Image (cartoon, helix red, strand yellow):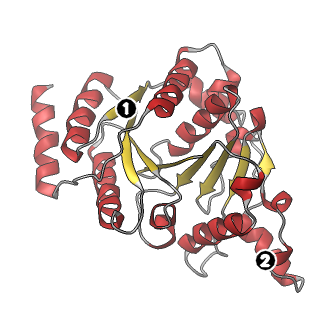
Amino acid sequence: MRQIAIYGKGGIGKSTVASNLSVAFAEKGLKVMQIGCDPKRDSTRNLTGGEMIPTVLDTYRELLRVGKDKHDLTLEDIVFTGCYGVLCVESGGPEPGIGCAGRGVLTAIEILRDLSAFEVYNLDIAIYDVLGDVVCGGFAQPIRQGYAREIYLVCSGEFMSLYAANNISKGINRLAGQAPSRLAGLILNSRGEEAFEQSVLKAFSESLGSQLIHVIPKSLEIADYEVEGKTVVEGAPQSEVAHRFRELAEKILAHEKLVIPEPLELKALQSLYRKVLKEK
């Protein structure tokens, strides 16, 4: 089973990339599970027609409220089927103002493991869509526990996107001795001038010892279908951007180069960015 994690700066489009990849993989007949690792529980909404599914933590808390425990949980309580048969899970988070959001990720993973979810569903691919640009505590669990063997960083050409990706690379590097998780590459989710964004991400990825895997062009079609609770691969299957997601899926299936990244110091990252800006 391929275990893939999508990390990146908050709001950079991780859930968009993850859900479109899930559908692209499922189109090939692969059994896919997407696991949303964010208290907002919106990772899978474009796989369920916009419906927000119950989270693992909310379901667990309800069992505790009525005097039961996690042994009374079933996979049917927390795993839901989305479009093209993609299996959807949302970890959820603590009650507002109480506890650590990262704990929700850890609890969800532990429950899925205890229920032998990956074996029961005979998965080909598990995709973890992980909150924002933090790799501490519970949010590092897909890496720390070795669940996410392949990590892809979603970036734009904005400096803060690279800054976040560099911080995540530091986390991967630090945890490399504890787990087999490695950086597989960068994915450009374009927001501006694509030629510049490609140049800066190519230079950045090479500095990490990795590579820019693929480019998703800026497209209003993506946003149009997300309003309807759909991926663009489902809603506009013949569109150019849908084909780009399918190409990304093909590249990931064929991809084998996994590395321990060598993150940059802040000044070096700033210098790299300024150099590409001057060459623009």
Q: Position of residue 81 (x, y in %)?
A: 80, 44
Determine the residue located farthest toward the bottom in the rendered image: 67
Q: Pick the residue in front: 86 or 31.
A: 31
Q: Pick the residue in front: 86 or 116.
A: 116
Q: Say what amino acid the circle numbered 1 marks.
A: Ile
Q: Is residue 191 left or right of residue 170?
A: right
Q: Position of residue 162 (x, y in %)?
A: 29, 47
Q: Residue at x 15, y 33 (%)?
A: 277
Determine the residue located farthest toward the right in the rendered image: 66
Q: Is residue 18 left or right of residue 61?
A: left
Q: Secondary structure at mark 2?
A: helix
In this rendering, the answer to whether 41 lies above or below 74 is above
Q: Earlier in the sequence, mark 1 or mark 2?
A: 2
Distance (Cα) linking label 1 and label 2: 40 Å
Q: Is residue 39 left or right of residue 180?
A: right
Bin the neighbour count of mark 1 within 10 Å (Cα to Cα): few under 14, some 14-19, many 20 and up: some
The image quarter containing residue 125 is top right
The image quarter containing residue 228 is top right
Residue for badge 2 = 70
Residue for badge 1 = 213
Q: Say what amino acid the circle numbered 2 marks.
A: Lys
Q: Residue at x 38, y 43 (%)?
A: 184
For the residues bearing labels 1 and 2, Cβ distance under 8 angstroms: no
Q: Quadrant of the C terminus?
A: top left
